[in-house]
Image: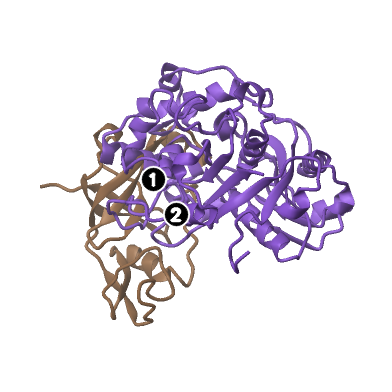
Chain colours: A purple, B brown
Amino acid sequence: MSAGNLKDVAAVCGVGHTAYGRKMNRSQIDLAGEAISNALDDAGLGRDDLDGLIVSFGTPIGADADTLAYALGLKLRAYNQTWAHGRFTASSIQWAAMMVSAGLTNVVACMASISFSGFRKPMMGGSGDAEGGREAGGGHGEDPVFGMTSPGAGAALVARKYFDRFGATSEQLAAVAVAFRKHAAMNPNAIMRTPISVEDHQNSRFVCEPLHLLDYCLINDGAACVLVTTQERARDMAKRPVCISGMQGLPAGREEFIWTYPGFGTSQQTAFDYVPGPQPVYEMADVSPKYLDALFTYDAFSILAWTALERFGFCGQGEAAAFTQDGRIELGGELPMNTNGGLMSEGHIMGWNHQVEIVRQLRGECGERQIPNAQLIQWANAYGDSLVYRAG
Amino acid sequence: MAEYTKPLPAISTLNQPYWDGLKQRQMVLPYCEACAKVWYPPAPFCPDCWSHDFRWQAVSGRGVVNSWVVFHQAYFSSFKDDIPYAVAEVELEEGPRLLTNLVEVANEDIAVGMSVEVVFDDVTDEVTLAKFRPRKG
């Protein structure tokens, strides 16, 4: 291993989750305990083998890391928590990979546990949304003074700009929702399993126009957990390791706006024609994207599938509208995406449910929705971070 | 006059001159004396060249609609009676983009690229908001 190169050094040794539901009447700590316990069972480990914890989307909406360590009687050597924001999934896995490779911990539980139904006030938009209280285009383009609130509103700004700049339509965007629902129909743990059509999408009400209800992800309860250790240790555990081959961090600054790529020209971004440069995730994993068996992305809103595809160069700027048609992103297509059904149809577990699905695809455990002989899968997001996983 | 119940800005030492300017019917933004950048939202010094030598300078108040959305859901009860209401992202001639509400235009007549100009809305005795209307001519 050369200094700084963590290709395949860390691996996922276990995954676990709860059932997902709209209103489960269970605390985040309770859900988290079940997900962690299931992940340890999956890896063939016991509680005291767990010495690291990273909670993404932590307190106050998610399970709090301190409370969790107490409640479950964990003996942690290192832990961390990100604030209540969905964008930290890859970052959490990256930190865990660094922790185990640096010898700070042996096994890190990376996870989120959510109970949206447990809050009296709506947490996504409106007066209960502490993060969305940031003004002048904060996290997702909020400015409550003008009624600009909720993550979806910023995504709607990107969608309008996209339609206008590239001549795309809402009917084309429907293909993303239709594909992910088709996948969810094959997933017993998905919350929304009834197939939908483009017409259903068009007939669903506007939430923040131009986005329809069926352009939005679900708001639900549930927890999912991924155990990260070194590949060397993982080889002695119950399941075949899934190696973390490539990593690319989460960028920030005035040229970034969470729901799209640089140059797009929303928020304070400079507007220019975007051409993706070399992506560190492929260099580290030493792979070409053409060898990927599937792509998973944070689909809080359908438009994010388009901006993620363009950000990572799966198609050119403005071409994702056409690229996502005709089953290309469905199982059996050229580039299957979110085979679990995604945040839009399986459930919103902050992308942790996607990591669980990636691991199971690479172990060949996905039954009806299994991608034949899946070896290489990428997690890549509109906001620029990424992981490449490889079957061990 | 009915009590104003919509969210009000969090006025801080960082953005106070912006809100003071609006109250005096002037839009002012930070302007860097060293590199001529005009920026928003506020920063303690120039985000481009890190010069501390900046002043709050009057800007044109003119711009174009860069993107816009229409809320069909009332996240804030105080906006319930406005549904469906539009929020626009306006790109000022000087470069920065502001989120705002448009006045004197129906939602169906809003378009990306539309020319707009600032109007000042005194929503309370202390707070004036910068809204925008279509620019004539």
For marks 1 and 2, the one nearer the N-term is 2
Q: Kindly report the distance in space between the C-alpha atoms of the residues bearing marks 1 and 2.
A: 9 Å
Q: Nearer the viewer, residue B78 or A7?
A: A7
Query: How many labels were placed on the picture?
Result: 2
The reply to whether residue A83 is in sight is no
Q: Residues within 10 Å of mark 1 (few under 14, many from 20)?
A: some
Relative to B45, is A163 above or below? above
The lab-note entry on whether marks 1 and 2 share a chain reads yes
Amino acid of disc 2:
Gln
Q: Residue at x 26, y 34 (%)?
A: A167
Q: Nearer the viewer, residue A125 or A175?
A: A175
Amino acid of disc 1:
Gly
Q: Residue at x 57, y 42 (%)?
A: A124
Say which quarter of the image contains residue B104: top left
Q: Position of residue A211 (x, y in %)?
A: 42, 33
Residue at label 1?
A: A313
The reply to whether residue A101 is in sight is yes
Say which quarter of the image contains residue A41: top right
Relative to A235, is A21 above or below? above
In-image side of B79 versus A273 (left or right): right
Q: Can you name the residue that lies furthest to the left here?
A: B137
Q: Are marks 1 and 2 in contact (CB under 8 Å)?
A: yes
The chain to which mark 2 is attached is: A
Q: Secondary structure at mark 2?
A: loop
Q: Residue at x 77, y 61 (%)?
A: A105
Relative to B41, is A368 above or below? above
Residue at label 2?
A: A279
The chain to which mark 1 is attached is: A
